[in-house]
Structures are given as structure tokens and as C-alpha cells.
Amino acid sequence: MKGSTGFFIHAKDLRFRNLLFFLCLPLAASAAPPDAPSVIVIRNATILTVSHGNIEHGSILIKDGKIAEVGQSVSAPKDAQVIDAAGQFVIPGIIDCHSHIAAESINEGSVSVSSMVNMAEILNPEDIDIYRDLAGGVTSANILHGSANAIGGQTLVIKLRWGQPAAKLPFEGALPGIKFALGENPKRSNFSVPGQPRRYPATRMGVEETIRGAFSEARDYKKAWDEYNKRIGAGEKNLIAPRHDLRLEPLVEVLEGKRYVHSHCYREDEILMLLRVAKEFGFRVRTFQHVLEGYKVADELAAAGVGASTFSDWWAYKVEAYDAIPYNAALMTQRGVIVSINSDDAEEATHLNQEAAKSMKYGGLSHDEALKMVTLNPAMQLGIDKRVGTIDVGKDADLAIYNRDPLSAYAVVQKTLIDGRIYFDLQRDIAERAEREKEKKALIDKFKKAAEKKPEEKKPDAASQKPGEKKPEEKKPEVKKPEEKPKPPQSGGTDAGSAVTLGGAL
Amino acid sequence: MSAVCFTALSALSCATPPVQAQGGEPQYFAIRGAKVVPVSGPPMENATIVVSRGLITALGKDVAIPPEAWVVEGKGLTVYPGLIDSFTDVGLPTAPPASGEGGPRRPQEGAHGPEDRPYSTPWRSGADEASLSDKRIETWRSGGFTTVVSSPKGGIFQGQAAVLNLAGERAGDLVVKSPVAIPVTFQTSGGFGGGFPSSIMGTLAYIHQVWLDTEWSVKAQATYEKNPRSVARPRYDRTEAALAEALEDHALILIPANNSIQLRRALELVDRWSVKGATYAIYGGQMGYEVASEIAAKKLPVLVNLKWPEAEKDADPEDKPSLRMLRFRDRAPSSPAALAKAGVKFAFYSGGITAPKDILKAVKKSIDVGLAPDTALRALTLSAAEIFGVSDRLGSVENGKIANLVVTDGDLFEEKTKIKMVFVDGRRFEIREPEKPKEPPKGDITGKWKLSYSTPDGGPEESTADLTMEKDGTISGTITSHRGTASIISGYLSVDKFSFTINIPIEGSPADVIFSGTFDGTSLKGTIRVQDFSLEFTGVKPTNATRAAAAYGGAR
């Protein structure tokens, strides 16, 4: 920790949320997962299916967590739980293709290749951001390692099943991923600590070399195991097996197409570089993340079949982000790239609907195309579009219900369902607040009373310290980190509907 | 009368053998007519325990007391098995070992990956580092803890834990069994140039890799030994070698997990690691009330940290605790009861509590919210012994077990109850609540005093009192006659009135000898009382102090 005082921490790269977590467990709005009635019917809603147009005054029948029927009328059994959504809008649950919530740590930035670490092992199901993002209509998120190294940790897609233990969060059957990062972050140009040795690499050339080096090792590693297995198969004795290498095994999975590569990037040159390296080693890049200069190489991206997951209008927070334009998402879409809008930020994730809407203003995408940016497109990018991303029979009942058109800035989520369970309900949340405050006060009073009873028993020692953990005072003080990308001034109450007409004018 | 007088004085001035009041007695005792709570069976009223050479050799109502045994009258006393602190570093010196002995605990330069074995010293051993110099040995023992499971602290693989008994003449006497556990922690470098691992996921990945490497090295080494001429020699690695050896000794792998997230993660780690032949236990366990049934399903024992979460004293008043945290503080002490109900085997550890009296108070909190006192006692004794594989020798009052006993004047968990004595390996230790001076002392009684008195048969005798006085007047020190030395168990100076007590065997039974009187600033005058007998004494400081003062004066 030495030399760290006053060091400027960039949120996206060095998230020490885990420390905050250890210091104070987040408020769990409700500890027990909500009950799931086996049959639910949503009635009288405007249904934006994303796949096959909009249905006015429509109904959705949910059976055992799956969408059983969608249409003007559905055959709901009498005992079905009814959600009356008169005047409300139902969309497929929002999918955030770049998230860092629900994790106790984000970066293993000490090494250039940290593929041995796995976000799946440090999920924090009590992170309040899960609940907040649910309240923004998000139902699935791609939980990524940070961008501190050229090859980062293993990643996974989760469903925001608030109240369930960590083991219940992973999106069943979704292919795992791995985070790569190009450019300034992995070369640590903004992150050197005075007095500490610089970590390799220090240039973009070095970033490329790091990736090539790691995949060369992975190729050799695979070869060593193949050879060993062959010789064992041939009945050879007295062989020493290769060591298992947890750093190289995920890279072998990438080579074998069993793990997606999600690569952080900004500039066109580094985007093309990774495409070349991938081609050389015979693996595919699944998505480029941020990809702010993607519009410059949209054809190459489309030709390589790589998804692009970008921001609506965040840029210029560092040199490599200067060439960004708000038309990026629209331009790439128009050249045939599958594009999603992501959050990379717990707060941003609470209004991804608005972020998607901006692509109507900047670039003139259609309402449906805009909505796809946060539903079907990220589902395709994450390989989960058979399960989620649209409102179709047979898909998971992951739905967000808004009081208005979800692409309106005035839209507020009323309910969020995952697997047919209501995980967020605005009315229930409001109703439970008083009770929670009451319980809180009762507990505080109880502790106060106990303390007054025997004041001599007060101990100076810190209490809730966990074994093996550092003392709180040894920790980095947990300050709200300045975001890497400063937020633009809030555009206030711009209705996305009117933005369509304004789009061409700006 | 005169016979008693004579005995008392001979005990004081020419006792045989040399008396070291605590721990220096012969190793034959009988506690007669006490209530015995064996833990392994139902309590017995009016029972007798015979202790010989460190072991319990007889137990029951009509047990013959061997002639050589020193008899402790047990009327009104209750005898429990010695308590066990299941995870601590009591008995180990707090300072890190000199460099070269234990190896660097933090890499000089940040580690570049798992292969650099960051924060790993699994070869360190609680047994090797046990030392009588640790003051907490006496503190813990006085609190009824006769046994600890101690491990060197610091690092991800910090070392191997040993079961230590808290008394002995040499450090080696402490060790009951070693190794019994391999504790791991999820320490990180903290980032910022500290090297690998800088995150908890890095630490986990590192530990996964170390277990894989350890298994690999065992196999590779065996293959090499069989075929040194055809197989390339595997590299020696101290971490792998130490862990492989400890696992062969059936050491438990201890996983840290306190809240529900960590507890569930620990359950998954057990599956993930599946180290060949390994057994596991969790330490922490304070949110066990949420996860008890899942832990039970995995049949994992839990060491429960008794340092219950509470508000930090100097917490920022603006920093409002979350409801979840408040619930945790409220419910943590209910975890043991929840674990018991779910059928989880658990034991307790002090977890940072510094006064052993507070350890029992913390247990009492759990009893107050539903933990059966029997279960609580078992967790402090037999369950702990079972978890660490020493229940064949420790954890209950049974014939043949090590004579680790706690003797109280009432129920162990009652606040008023006092621990009267403790036996460790059959050595007896009197426990005294130090008498506190009522008022501040006048002057300082510290120094070597020559005490003079006459024996009943008229002969003059002398003893030396080597006294140390604290600022508040508390006196400690030793009394030495020409035959032996006894430690002061309790003493004080209040204004000019002093009192200090030693305990020595008289006619085969321990008895208090109380020195009390007046201190006028330069000399002592008072009474020595033993049982019903008393005699006068005076005390002066050897004149060298006076002489030195005079010399100084002359020089001026």
C-alpha cells in the first residue's frame, strides 16, 4: 500500500469495492428471494417484443419461469397470479454487456496476464448495485474483470437474482468469457506509482507482445498435454504429467472456442491489431468493449463477425478516447455490426434504456433498433439470445415493466422479473421502507441499551473483523473514485420520442 | 498448636523439595469430593479425581487416594476439562522470527505470479515456534484455557498449527500434537506495486494453483525416485514439500469464512480444491445462522470466532451501519446455537479477544440466545479435541486422559464464578484474583527486602522478598528462603498498609501464607499468617542503597 496516498484511482481499472464490502456489508433490501408462483399473467400491457413488433393491450403468460404465450389474449388458468399492466410497457429485461457489479474485486492488476483469476469465484450477491440495476430494468449482466492487464481474468454472465446466494447468480449455460484490454490501461500509462517498479508492458507494442506470448505458451501447453495423453494412451509408464497451469488453461479454452474474448479497446489501430493476432492463433474475438473508434473500422468488425459494445456518449476522459463520436453505435449498426450499449458503471446501468434511446437522436436509429442495443444485441453478443433478449414463447420470463415508453426519459421501472419471479417491485419497495427503518431503529436502540447497561465492557477493538483480514486502518480509505469517464451534464427531461425528430438537426 | 506452628515455619523456611509454588509441585494430586463435569458423560457429584504424572488415573465416587497424592478438598468446587482455544497464536512469540529462520513473509519484491509463492511459509510450525516467553500463556491458563491450537500468523499459507498445552518447563513440553492444521488466509498484497496477488480472486487462484502443484509434486517426485535414470528431476519447492508433508500427517485445512457469502464460498472451495486425502474446517462462522444447514450438509466442522461483531468505538457518526450489518451484530451470537441445531460440529476460538474472561462472556452471550450450556462446554473442550484429532488424550475428564482440569467454585458460565485452580498436564496452578489496593500507595515498596523473624523454637530466620510494585499499588514478586522460592500470587500496598500472599504446600495440602503490615517508607513491620498461626516479622532493604546515597553525598 505504500506510496498510494493521494493516488488518483480510476474507477474502471482499479475497483476496490471489495474493501467497502468488507468494511460494511451492504443493505440487503430483502434477504429471502421472492416467491415464484408457477403461473403469472401480465395483462393489458403494451408489449415491445423486439423480435416481432409491438402488441397493444397484450398479455404475457408465464409458466415455470418461461414465457408460455404472448399476444392479444392468452389462455391463463384461473389461479394464475395477475399483474395488471394497464398503460404500462413490457420489454425484454435489459442486458448489460459490460458490468462490474456484484464482485468483490475487479482487477488482478499485479501481472500482465491474470487469466488465472475468475470473477465467478468472488461474486458478491449482496452488492446493493444488483438491486439498483434491477430497479433500472436490468436482468442480466456480463461481469467483467477490469482492464489493468492485456489478458485479464475469467468472466461470466449473471442474472440479477437479488436475494439468492452467489451460486444462483450465474446465467446457466452461458459460455464463460475472458477480459482482454488494449491501449493505455494495460500499459499502465496512467497508473504508475512513484517509487514502484513499472509493470510490463509500457507500450502498445508490448501489449501485443504480451498477448502473443501468452497464446504461444498456451499453444505449447496444450501440445504438452496432448502429447502426454497420447503417450499414456499408448501405454507408456513412468511419465510425469505436465503441471496444471491455471493461467494457461483458460487461454487453451479460447483456442478451442470454449471461452469468449471480450476486449477493452479504444483506438482503431489496436482493434485491428487484436484481429490480426486472433487470426494468427486461430481464435475469435467475441466483443470489443468501449470500441470508441469502432466507426472507423466498422467494415472490418463486421467482416470478422465481432460484436461491438460501446457507450452512448462518453468520451474524452483520456487521450485515447478523444476521437469518439455519439454516432458510433448507429454507424457501426448501419455497417452490419451487432452493437450494444453498455454501462461499465453501476449507476449508468440504472438507465441503459435512456442510453439506448440516444442512438435514435444520434444517428437516427429506429425505436426497435435502439431497444435492441440493450436487449437482443447484447444477448447475441453473449451467446444467450436463445434464452433472453426478446419476448417470445419459450424464452426465459426476464422482463422489465415501465410506466411509459422505456425509451422515454420519464420512464420508470415498475417491476422487474427474472425467470418469472418478481425481483423488483417499485410499490413493494416503497411499502417496505418504513418497516426496514423501524427494524433498524429498534436494533440501534437495543445496542445502545446494552452498551449503557455495562459501560465498562466497551472495548476499543474493532469489531467485525474477519479472520485473516487486514485491519481496517491498513486499508486504502474507501473514497468514491472519480470515474474514468466524467459524466456529461444530465440532459434533463428530453423525451426520446421527440429526440427522433431532433436527431437529424444535431 | 505448636506442632502446626512448627510445620508452617518449616514449610516456609526449609521446605523440601524446593518450592516453586506454581507448577513446581510433585505430580500426584487427588481432588476429593468435588462435582465433576467430565463432558464425555453426565456430571458426578462428590467425586474424586486422581492425577498422577500428568494423567488422570482414577475418577469416581469411591476412589482410593494413593498415599503420595496431595489432597485438594473439592467440597463446593466443580471440576471441568481444561478449556481449548481452537485457533490462536497464544504460546508463540508475537515478533516474527529472525530472517532466515522462517523465511520472508512478504516478498522483498512483488511476486510476479503463483510460481513466486507469495506470502507463503507453510513450513513454519506452531510447535517449533512455541515459547514459554509468551506472557499470554499465563493469562490464558488463568482464564481456564489449558490448551490452544496455535499457528504462526502472517501470510496466505502462514504455517502449521499445533495443539499446545499451556504449561511446561521447556517449550517442548507445550506440544501435544503437531501439525494439526494448515490455516490459510485470503491475504492480498493490496496492489500498488505490492505484487501478486493484489485481489482476493488472485489469492484464490494462487491457492488453487498451490494445491495442484502440491499434488503434482508428490506424484512427480515418486515417479522420479523410481526412475532417476529415465525421468527428468522435478524441481524442489519448499511450499509444496511442506504442504505435502502436513497433508500426509492429516492436518486439517482451515478456511476463513465469516459472513454468509464467505461461508458459502468456503463450501465451494472444498469441492474445488478436493485436495487428495485432505479434510477441512471453517474458521470464522459468525453468520452461521444463515448457512448452518448448508454447512451441515457438507459435514464441515466450524471454529467459531468469539469476537462478536460490534460497532467500532470511534466509528464516524455519519457512517450509518446498514440494516444487514445491524442484523449481523444482533444475530452473530446465535450462530453457535444454529450450528448445533443443524448438527454441525463446532468449537470456539478467541479471535482477537485479549482477556480470557471475555472469551467466556462471549460464550455466555450465545448461551443467552439459545445455545445449550452443555453444548457450549463441549465446544470449548471435547468438540475442539475431536476436530483436531486429539480427543484420545484431551477434551474430557476421563481415566487416562491428560490431566488438564479447570476447578471452579460454581458453574463455569456464571459471571460470579471464580476459577480456583487449573491443572495442565497434572501441574497445579492456583488462580487468584489479584487483591486490589483500596487506596493509592504511599511510597514505593519495590526492591529486595530482607525479612527477619524468629521460629517458634527460638531460632532466628531470614527470607528475601523481591518485590515489584505497579503504580496502582499492586505487588508482585517472589519470596525466597534458603531452601526455595515461591511466587507472590496476590499483593498490594494501600497507603502504608501492605499485604502479599504466597501459596505453599503444608502437610501435603496447599496453604496460603500471608504477609501483612505497615510500610513506613524505609522498613516493613508486620505479621506472617499461616492457617491459624501467626508470627511477627520485620523487613529492611540491604544497606547498599543507603551506602550508595552516602557515597553520592560525599562526592558532592
Image: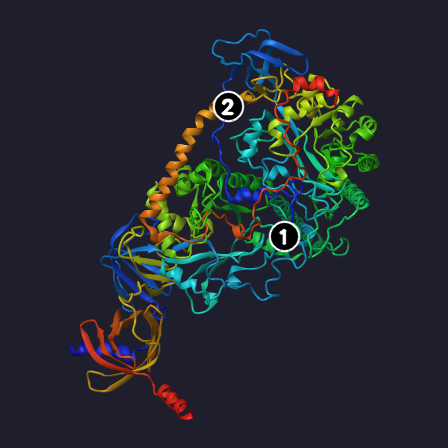
Q: In which quarter of the image is the N terminus of chain B?
A: bottom left
In the image, is residue A376 above or below residue B237? above
Between residue A289 and residue B186, name the one nearer to us.
A289
In the image, is residue B23 above or below residue B57? below
Q: Residue A426, which numbered label?
A: 2
Chain for numbered disc 2: A
Residue type for callout 1: Ser
Q: Looking at the picture, how far across and down is residue B394, in whole percent? A: 40, 55
| Residue annotated with mark 1 | A4
Q: How is the image coloured?
A: rainbow
Q: Is residue B61 left or right of residue B214?
A: left
Instruction: Specify few, some or many for label 1: CA neighbours under 10 Å numbering under 14, 14-19, or 20 or more.
Output: some
Residue type for callout 2: Leu
Q: Do labels 2 and 1 share a chain?
A: yes
The reply to whether residue A317 is visible in this rendering is yes
Q: Is residue B33 left or right of residue B237?
A: left
Q: Which of the marked residues, 2 or 1, is nearer the chain's N terminus?
A: 1
Circles 2, 1 touching at the beta carbon (< 8 Å): no
Chain for numbered disc 1: A
Q: Looking at the picture, how far across and down is residue B224, in whole percent? A: 71, 54
Between residue B388 and residue A420, name the one nearer to us.
A420
Q: Looking at the picture, how far across and down is residue A435, in whole percent? A: 41, 29
